[in-house]
Amino acid sequence: MSKRSASLLLGTFCAFVYSASTAVRSQTPQPQYAGSVSCRRCHAPTYERWSKTLMANVVRDPKAHPEAVLPDFSKPDPLLTFTLQDVAFVYGSKWKQRYFKKIGDDYFPLPAQWDVTNRVWRPYFVQPNTDWWVAHYPPDNMKRPTGPLCDGCHSVNYDIRSKTVTEWNVGCERCHGPGSDHVRQPTARNIVNPAKLDFVRATDTCLQCHTQGQPLQSPQEGQYYDWPVGFHQGGRLSDVWRLEEHKLGETSFTHFADGTAHKNRMQGNDFVQSQMYKRGVTCFSCHDVHGTPNNADLIKPARDVCFTCHAPGSPNGPRAATIEQHTHHAPGSAGGDCVACHMPRIEQTIANVSVRSHTFRFVTPEESEQFKIPNACVDCHKDKSNAWATAALKKWPNLSPWRVGQ
């Protein structure tokens, strides 16, 4: 047999093998979503912790869970133009609560929301020139369905064609992927464990819902989606989603001039800019979404989380003999907490209520003067000016006067 004939035969054989293996894979049943309850049998303690978290209780039916309704609907208010009977779902409970009405096979946001912190009703309507999707929908809440704009992140396996879900809320398979194979034969090989993914894909687990962005393909099925349609756990989010763009030096609806997030649901936009992310830290280095006794489901109290990697004498800093020499605040005081300066509450969620930034970068008072970015110093010392704060920082011996003066 000639070399040419042998090469042709080998090529034909390889093509046959590839075709056959592809056919076998295409005939192999794909894992299906089984629902969080199916995880309970083997993971009961974890399930019980998770079931009490905010993630497990984002969206609730007020008829089945009347305790989920925070305001008193019997008290009249000019903004309250609907009744509790109109509400199919309540959404949220920590900062704000919104109300969805069901019409046909879609849900729609009603025109008032409850400000949990201030205990008042506030209007709910997304204004023009804010979120990118607003231009693609009529200026009417009853023509802005939650399916394309919300539900993909508040459910497991939202189907954009049938408008159905495996379950509402952030269930187990939202982060671990479809679990039918694992339920049938539990092994580490047939379920996604974010902790075993590389740090990019591990963090994508959270970024899929905790970022402001747009699908790479838009519209889809005639709709504009504000969540990453087509993302499957264990994949790369960047294959279907791009983060909201920002031009350095410009303040926009989504960003401050330096690129720090301006609003809630942008923890991921912040985090991917941080030194933490660049060094391979993931969201669950600090948080346990299965539930903890700590605020924001932190694995430890905030100060202790930071001290896991940052302590006097650590190469990661701070570069001071004691924490007090670094913070220049008394132990146990508000200013003595790491998050007070490195994660200030500057990202608006509703009215005067803001959540913490996740760049972990200290915003100097001088930057506030130049770029109108809030800083932690005068946010706490409300009777003082940025000039006062800058002068004070320049006297701190362990801080570069060049850095704080810029």
Image (cartoon, rainbow, N blue to C red):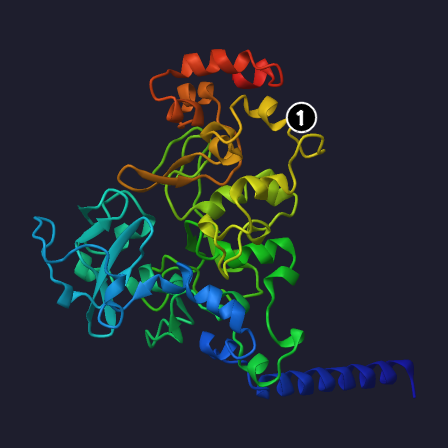
**Whether residue 371 is situated above or below residue 306 in the rendered picture:** above
Q: Name the residue tied to disc 1.
A: 319
Residue 199: x percent and y percent? 63, 54
For residue 357, side relative to residue 394 (left or right): left
The one nearer the camera, 222 or 289, is 289
Q: Does residue 205 appear in this view?
A: yes
Name the quadrant containing residue 1: bottom right
For residue 103, side relative to residue 276 (left or right): left
Which amino acid does the dot numbered 1 rest on?
Answer: Arg
Residue 9: x percent and y percent? 82, 86
Tell me what residue is drawn at x 57 percent, y 19 percent. Answer: 403
Residue 17: x percent and y percent? 73, 85
For residue 169, side relative to residue 325 (left or right): left
The one nearer the camera, 110 or 326, is 326
Tell me what residue is drawn at x 90 percent, y 81 percent. Answer: 3
Name the quadrant containing residue 376: top left
Tell me what residue is drawn at x 45 percent, y 57 percent. Answer: 216
Tell me what residue is drawn at x 53 percent, y 69 percent. Answer: 45
Q: Does residue 230 appear in this view?
A: no
The one nearer the camera, 317 or 312, is 312
* Disc 1, SS: loop
**Whether residue 174 is situated above or below residue 80 in the rendered picture:** below
